[in-house]
Image (spheres, helix red, strand yellow):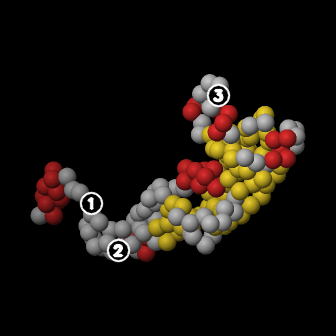
């Protein structure tokens, strides 16, 4: 199994002060939420600067970008978009938390594993994209949606159905006026 987002960071760990600018792009399969998905053949782009905090932990700062496709949550027509998710994530050697107690990070930030001289940016990329994908995308802010009576796309014109809920008292007045 290839892991296209694995980065060799040994150099950083041995020589703190070096910054590594990584730009990678790769398709990631099965990446989506209820309302939208990243197409399996589209690239997810990771653009981060990685720096060592000490000899067992790193921080990756930058952004993750991905295209998505969806159906409009009102009218179901296909739509496309893209997300850009800022990231600032920690990688830490599992052994670092073994011996000594480590303070919990502020706001319970997820810490990704630093394994030997390598970090895998894929979990970071997936998490960032999942958080950024829209759950109820619209083709347009003012999408008129589907008619609840006949199912017609009301963006394409009035289907003629009466979908107003009438107040009985007004109905009575209308009847008086008509007579
Ligand atoms: Zn729509
Ligand atoms: Zn209708």
Mark 2 neighbour class, 10 Å CA radius: few under 14, some 14 to 19, many 20 or more: some
Name the residue tied to disc 3.
Answer: 99
In the depicted view, which residue is nearer to us: 172 or 155?
A: 155
Name the residue tied to disc 1.
Answer: 164
| Relative image position of residue 171 (x, y in whole percent) | 16, 57
Mark 1 neighbour class, 10 Å CA radius: few under 14, some 14 to 19, many 20 or more: few
Return the disc, 3 or 1, that comes first in the chain's sequence: 3
Under circle 3, the secondary element is: loop
Mark 3 neighbour class, 10 Å CA radius: few under 14, some 14 to 19, many 20 or more: few
For the C terminus, the image quarter is bottom left
Disc 3 to disc 1: CB gap under 8 Å: no
| Residue 152 badge | 2
Distance from Cα at disc 3 to Cα at disc 1? 68 Å
| Relative image position of residue 19 (x, y in whole percent) | 85, 45
Under circle 2, the secondary element is: loop
Q: Quadrant of residue 82?
A: bottom right
């Amino acid at each position: 199994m290839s892991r296209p987002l694995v980065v060799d960071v040994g150099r950083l760990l041995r020589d703190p002060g070096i910054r590594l600018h990584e730009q990678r792009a790769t398709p990631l399969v099965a990446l989506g939420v209820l309302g939208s998905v990243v197409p399996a053949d589209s690239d997810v782009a990771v653009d981060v600067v990685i720096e060592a905090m000490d000899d067992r932990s790193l921080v990756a700062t930058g952004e993750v970008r991905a295209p998505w496709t969806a159906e409009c949550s009102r009218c179901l027509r296909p739509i496309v978009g893209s997300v850009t998710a800022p990231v600032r994530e920690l990688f830490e050697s599992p052994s670092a938390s073994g011996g000594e107690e480590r303070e919990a990070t502020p706001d319970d930030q997820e810490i990704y594993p630093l394994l030997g001289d390598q970090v895998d940016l894929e979990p970071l990329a997936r998490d960032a994209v999942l958080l950024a994908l829209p759950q109820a995308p619209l083709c347009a802010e003012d999408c008129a949606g589907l008619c609840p009576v006949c199912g017609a796309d009301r963006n394409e014109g009035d289907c003629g159905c009466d979908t107003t809920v009438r107040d009985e008292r007004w109905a009575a007045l209308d009847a008086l006026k008509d007579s």
